[in-house]
Image (spheres, coloured by chain):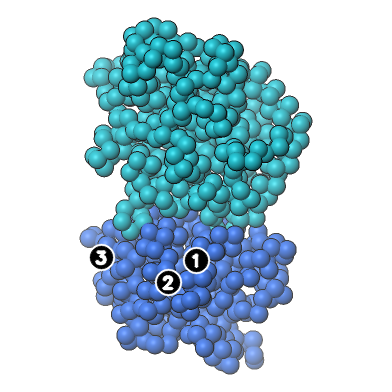
Chain colours: A blue, B cyan
Amino acid sequence: MSRIAATFARLKSEDRAALITFVEAFDPDRATSAALLAGMAARGADIIEIGMPFTDPMADGPTIQQAGRRALAGGATVAGTLGLVRDFRAGNDTVPLVLMGYLNPILSYGVARFTADAAAAGVDGLIVVDLPTEETDLMLADVRANGLDLIRLVAPTTSDARLPVVLKDSSGFVYYVSITGITGTRTASAADLARDIPRLRAATSLPIAVGFGVRTPEQAAIVARHADGAVVASALIDRMAAGLDDQGKASAALIATVLDDVTALAAAMRRERVTVLA
Amino acid sequence: MNKPIPNSLRNLPDERGRFGAFGGRFVAETLMPLILELEAAYEAAKADPAFQTEFDYYMKHYVGRPSPLWFAERLTRKLGGAKIYFKRDELNHTGAHKINNCIGQILLAKRMGKTRIIAETGAGQHGVATATVAALFGLPCVIYMGAVDVERQQPNVFRMRLLGAEVVPVTSGAATLKDAMNDAMRDWVANVRDTFYIIGTAAGPHPYPAMVRDFQSVIGTEARAQMIEAEGRLPDVAIAAIGGGSNAIGLFHPMLDDEVKLIGVEAAGRGLDSGEHAASLSRGRPGVLHGNRTYLLQDADGQILEAHSISAGLDYPGIGPEHSHLHDIGRVEYVAVTDDEALEAFQLCCATEGIIPALEPAHALAHVAKIAPAMEPSQIILMNLCGRGDKDIFTVAKHLGAKL
């Protein structure tokens, strides 16, 4: 069983939803990302997404755009990101890692080489934002051959008729973009989720994670009531970005503050399910 | 519509929006349903004679088409070789070919019931053309423009505001055209239900490259007929400048199956080996940006590089996907011209023909000046004079050391 499938199976037995946190690789440098990855896993992140920096992240809001720019200035490359994964895996063999990024750096690295190197480094799944179902044949065979999950984005604009098309080749989990918009901006309401998630449930047996606009422990708890996972990205990056020093570096104290947020998110999501059961 | 001819180069893209290995639809799922809706709406409009009639009406009475075909006699004599003709799209309303596409797209937006228009712009020509049609049809309009370009192009910013558009300075990335396009896409993702995105060049996700080409093909269709009327035959060479490539594909597409040598002129900026140019075909390699697979300026790790050209309209690190295809199959020859060569051609055009060209077609003219003297007087060059140079006088003055 893949790490992603094993994680969701375990969470199901614990009757709780996954906390999925996000680290932009090399933001602002490699050491900070390595510390965040290890720390998040220790503080209760069930799955971690690693953003692969790109100069032109069209689906991302200002927070991740700026994180990407800091990361590229900090020396981020595709090979460097895979190195981060390898180092994390040396100390942790259970928490799934999902790479999230845009197609061009992957094409430049070579799809076959990228999927092989990612799998060897210990990556479990891929989210390629600008690779819609219609273009998936560009990567699908290599993704499959290397045992990686291809995680699909589903949006509020995805019609019922289109859902089976989008979900056809997806595995791991479904990433529900809960708003029409870019990352880190608007937030979906409980009512939105109550309306949208059952629509997805009817179309897939895969776990459903909700992202884009989930910022606080309270919002993560609301998501946990409806879905199988909540993705928190921009809020964690904002916390770090606000505390960078004059040289743009993250201190140990700042990293600890970000990790305290992860602890609070994990606690809120656990409480939520306990409340529901009670 | 005419039946497709087998083996014609004019049948692309295929049903997936591909021109050979290029094009496609590389967008986030949030936009994908919209792209499919747009494609269906465009296919329906193309099949509807009423849509073509409406387009033709605005082309004739609002844009001022057909634009003239001008025999540049003094320039021909000066260069001493092939006969040179200009297709004078600089005489269109708003002063460039951009308006052809904007009229087509806003008519489609109206058909689709969209109530808000957005666009990206570099130098501001497409922004002005979009603001113009938005005013004409009474729709609110937001133009994304790199903050650096807003500073460099104040007259066009003011024009857009006079026309009622909101101009949003974009500060993300390098704050130029590609970043403006990113932010326009982000706006579209956030306002999918009511908003129509008028892309200014023959790039972006399918169906944009085909749609923009079709609207701009009015240039080549007219020029083809005008050449036959003037000379009883087609030109030996047709030539146009290329940024994203909309004026060039508009000129070339109706002649793809003809025995006409086609030449696209990229911006070599400060030189092809200077690292400061916009020559995606000459110095880039294939990749994916802004929804399509095409030649891009990028580093070894697939990060997109900034383009440079004296002409803001050519200052883009990509190129329309159909040009990438025509490049790879060798149907069109792509060359590059430097800032300095374009400036020289700009002045040559002013002095010999009494026409102040935009810096974009000045690039095409610089290449005409290179090849015409070696050609026979019986041969013909057709050049697309796709924009007028009023917008560029400040840039040119600066480079010539003149104070305005």
Residue at the location (47% across, 83% down)?
Answer: A46
From this viewpoint, is residue A245 visible?
A: yes
Q: What residue is pinned by disc 1? A: A139
Q: What residue is pinned by disc 3? A: A249
State how far apart marks 2 and 3 are (Cα).
31 Å
Q: Nearer the viewer, residue A96 or A13?
A: A96
For the residue marked with disc 3, what is the amino acid? Lys
- Mark 1 residue crowding within 10 angstroms, few (<14) / some (14–19) / many (20+): some
* Position of B255 relative to A177 (above/below): above
Q: Earlier in the sequence, mark 2 or mark 1?
A: 2
For the residue marked with disc 2, what is the amino acid? Thr
* Front: mark 2 or 3: 2
Residue A115 badge:
2
- Chain under disc 2: A
From this viewpoint, is residue B153 visible?
A: no
- Judging from the image, what secondary structure is the residue with disc 2 in? helix
- Judging from the image, what secondary structure is the residue with disc 1 in? loop
Q: Earlier in the sequence, mark 3 or mark 1?
A: 1
State how far apart marks 3 and 1 are (Cα).
36 Å
Q: Earlier in the sequence, mark 2 or mark 3?
A: 2
Q: In this rendering, would B91 be left or right of B5?
A: left
Residue at the location (38% across, 42% down)?
Answer: B280
Task: Locate residue A224, reporting x and y percent.
Answer: 58, 79
Task: Locate residue B134, reporting x and y percent.
Answer: 61, 32
